[in-house]
Image: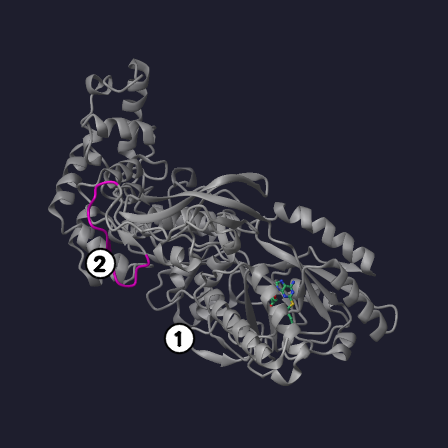
């Protein structure tokens, strides 16, 4: 390649890398697979090696990608936050080990770790307390996400044990475990929001939320894996991590000390298979020289340490063909393009469909019917089309036409500003939306009535139901009209419908299907206002005062209750006996704590969440910090010293668990919410 060609190609590669780095780090919506990105970076590195005078300090090969976001204050990193050299080839790991052997005296060890696939975080503890948390940013300055990080349950606010330096940094990854990711995406789809493509994007998107209360609901999790050597004095990296673990910091114990390449290869081989059993995403193995002194000897390049390398697992990919593209209308009217694929096996399942998210995404991919496309699962749950094999594009292929009208009812589609998706505005006449709302109303997390899509479809087609209130007018005679329904199925359905009348208010509110009101928002609204009339009469400002309710949700709730058809339907449901307030024997155990604002701290004989539920069930209000308004601090074992000190300062009473239990009717009567323990609670 001659120089002018090299200049052109280098600029081209840099542009591709910068564009994708922005989509990856800032938009949390990459359009290139990690593998393609890494290969493009390697191509640029090779060209820059061949033409060293074309290297510039701002080349993506010299700089880490930036996640800086205007919504946050920024602070400089004490030590630059670097990336890792990575490879997909075992031979290159072998070459790394050979170089280490040559450069270092014998007797050193490697510390092999999982490469966690989340978003990097740097925590600063001062005097044993979490002082500041920064994202990687551009490696030099990071976004201050301290308030959000305080909402991550396994990050301690205060260290335990002893021996921690007065002021030190520890770095790691914020992850969203698969379970939380699936829950979040299900909730987003329920409320008509685009799902996150993978847990990594979900984690970094969540860490950048502007409302910390919302972060608390996201189920984020953290694992720490690096203490800059300037911060502590331990002989080995492994010893530093063990010390950090003894201070209560979350450090993975899946790391292994390896004595040479064959042990490293065993570790890689083991995790390439078993990583599928982990509850969070990993995308490779990190191999680090374990001795701190040797790390210092080897030092850093501009972008990464010389003492570590990442071996990345190849994301599983498959090549298949797009057979057709469907445009699906959801219950909120959002139109989602979905590609039907020639079935192809991938990571243990057969992939037949892949979402194309929205029109912009489709345009970016430039996907057409008949195209050969790469589908990838990697650590991701939803299969996605990562790229189109343009060389195999049929010559007669045509760009797909995103519909202008609703594929179901024919209404002209509309798009709101700031929305990537197109919507069918015909809420009351579009059969798919109506049926979607009816199904949602009966669904398990809502009214939990035994009836699925097919039943609702039949009922709708026979003209038996149009709004949820119509379900409660159904009688045995009309239900017998349904195909294959006999007395037994009719009886089962009517019993299930009757049982649904005692569904708690928060679930009824969720069942109404108000746009953007998912399960947790419905719960917050129900708890805050207590009954539907108070919500219906609330001003926008009143609504915005509720936990995670922002402008968008507030506007949606406000509008919902300004529609007289909705109010009439609620009246009908109320007349049928559905619960429209939190009061009542099932949601309240007693009023023993009415009017009291209680802060809890420490560990109890039941989980903290359960304890909060007990407080609420007995009429009390939970609050997170001690203030003049606090009625008392309910202190369990290891209650926070800071909270206790504040109580002393403000003269707030401290109550033990035993004393507390004496204040309320016996515990069996209080409906504590039962939560399944997750791996992280154990
Ligand atoms: S060590 C000085 N260890 O991978 C380098 N990084 O692709 C310190 N990562 O920027 C990083 N798991 O965000 C290290 N066990 C692990 C890791 C890990 C994930 C991330 C980290 C890093 C990126 C590089």
Classify mark 1: residues with Cα within 10 Å, few (<14), some (14-19) or many (20+).
few
**Residue lying farthest to the front in this orientation:** 395
Regarding residue 572, the answer to whether it shows in the image is yes
Whether residue 360 sits left or right of residue 112 in the image: it is left
Circle 1: element type: loop
Q: Secondary structure at mark 2?
A: helix
- Residue 496: quarter of image: top left
Residue occupying the point 39% across, 38% down: 669
Q: CA distance from mark 1 to mark 2?
A: 25 Å
Mark sitting earlier along the chain (1/2): 1
Point out the quarter of the image occupied by ligand 1.
bottom right
- Total labels drawn: 2
Image coordinates of residue 533 in percent, x first then y, are 17, 48
Kindly give the residue lying farthest to the top in the view shown.
Answer: 487
Picture coordinates of residue 15, whole percent (x, y): 50, 73
Q: Position of residue 338 (x, y in %)?
A: 39, 46
Frontmost residue, 344 versus 431 = 344
Report the magenta residues as a range.
408-420
Q: Residues within 10 Å of mark 2 (few under 14, many from 20)?
A: some
Disc number for residue 555 = 2
Q: Is residue 180 visible?
A: no
Residue 139 locus on image (x, y percent)? 55, 76
Residue 415, magenta (yes or no):
yes
Residue 181 colored in magenta in the image: no
Name the dominant secondary structure of the magenta segment. loop
Residue hosting label 1: 70
- Above or below residue 459? Residue 5 is below
Splitting the image into 4 quarters, where does residue 455 fall?
top left
User: Given the current orientation, which residue lies at the most extreme right position?
Assistant: 106
Q: Is residue 45 above or below residue 599?
A: below
- Residue 496 vertical placement versus 216 (above, below): above
């Amino acid at each position: 390649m001659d120089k002018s060609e090299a200049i052109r190609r280098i600029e081209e590669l840099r542009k591709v890398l910068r564009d994708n780095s922005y989509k990856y780090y800032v938009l949390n919506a990459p359009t290139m697979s990690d593998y393609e990105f890494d290969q493009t970076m390697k191509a640029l590195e090779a060209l820059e090696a061949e033409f060293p005078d074309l290297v510039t300090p701002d080349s993506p090969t010299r700089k880490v990608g930036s996640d800086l976001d205007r919504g946050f204050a920024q602070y400089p990193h004490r030590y630059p936050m670097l990336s890792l050299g990575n490879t997909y080839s075992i031979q290159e790991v072998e070459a790394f080990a050979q170089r280490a052997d040559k450069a270092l005296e014998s007797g050193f060890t490697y510390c092999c770790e999982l490469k966690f696939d989340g978003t990097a975080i740097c925590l600063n503890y001062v005097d044993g307390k979490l002082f500041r948390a920064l994202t990687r940013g551009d490696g030099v300055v990071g976004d201050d996400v301290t308030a959000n990080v305080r909402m991550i349950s396994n990050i301690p606010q205060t260290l335990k044990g002893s021996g921690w330096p007065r002021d030190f940094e520890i770095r790691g990854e914020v992850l969203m475990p698969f379970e939380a990711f699936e829950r979040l995406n299900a909730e987003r789809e329920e409320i008509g929001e685009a799902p996150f493509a993978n847990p990594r994007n979900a984690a970094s998107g969540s860490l950048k939320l502007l409302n910390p209360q919302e972060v608390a609901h996201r189920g984020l999790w953290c694992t720490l894996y690096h203490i800059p050597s300037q911060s502590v004095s331990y002989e080995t990296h492994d010893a530093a991590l063990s010390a950090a673990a003894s201070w209560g910091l979350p450090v993975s114990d899946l790391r292994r000390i390896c004595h040479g390449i064959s042990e490293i290869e065993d570790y890689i081989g083991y995790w390439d298979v078993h990583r599928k059993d982990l509850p969070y995403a990993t995308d490779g193995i990190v191999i680090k020289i374990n001795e701190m002194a040797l790390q210092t000897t080897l030092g850093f390049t501009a972008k990464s340490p010389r003492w570590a390398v990442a071996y990345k697992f190849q994301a599983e990919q498959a090549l298949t063909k797009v057979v057709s593209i469907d445009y699906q209308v959801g219950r909120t009217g959002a139109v989602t393009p979905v590609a039907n694929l020639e079935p192809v096996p991938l990571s243990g399942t057969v992939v037949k469909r892949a979402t194309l998210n929205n029109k912009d995404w489709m345009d970016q991919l430039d996907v057409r019917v008949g195209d050969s496309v790469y589908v990838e699962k990697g650590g991701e749950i939803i299969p996605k089309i990562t790229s189109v094999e343009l060389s195999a594009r049929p010559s007669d292929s045509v760009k797909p036409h995103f519909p202008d009208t609703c594929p179901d009812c024919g209404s002209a589609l509309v798009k709101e500003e700031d929305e990537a998706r197109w919507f069918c505005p015909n809420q009351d006449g579009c059969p798919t939306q109506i049926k979607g709302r009816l199904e949602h109303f009966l669904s398990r997390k809502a009214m939990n009535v035994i009836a699925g899509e097919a039943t609702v479809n039949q009922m709708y087609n026979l003209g038996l139901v149009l709004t949820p209130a119509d379900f409660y007018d159904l009688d045995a005679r009309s239900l017998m009209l349904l195909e294959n329904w006999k007395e037994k199925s009719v009886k089962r359905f009517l019993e299930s419908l009757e049982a649904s009348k005692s569904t708690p208010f928060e679930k009824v509110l969720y069942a109404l299907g108000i746009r953007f009101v998912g399960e947790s928002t419905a719960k917050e609204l129900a708890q805050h206002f207590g009954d539907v009339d108070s919500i219906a009469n609330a001003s926008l400002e009143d609504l915005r005062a509720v936990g995670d309710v922002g402008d968008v949700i507030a506007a949606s709730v406000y509008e919902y209750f300004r529609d007289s058809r909705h109010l009439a339907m609620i009246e009908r449901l109320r007349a049928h006996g559905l619960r429209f307030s939190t009061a009542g024997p099932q949601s309240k155990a007693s009023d023993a704590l009415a009017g009291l604002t209680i802060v809890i701290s420490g560990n109890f004989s039941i989980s903290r969440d359960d304890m909060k539920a007990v407080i609420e069930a007995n009429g009390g209000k939970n609050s997170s910090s001690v203030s003049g308004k606090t009625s008392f601090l309910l202190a369990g074992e290891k209650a926070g010293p800071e909270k206790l000190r504040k109580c002393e300062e403000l003269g707030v009473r401290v109550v033990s668990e035993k004393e507390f239990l004496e204040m309320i009717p016996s515990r069996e009567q209080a409906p504590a919410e039962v939560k399944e323990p997750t791996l992280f609670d154990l």
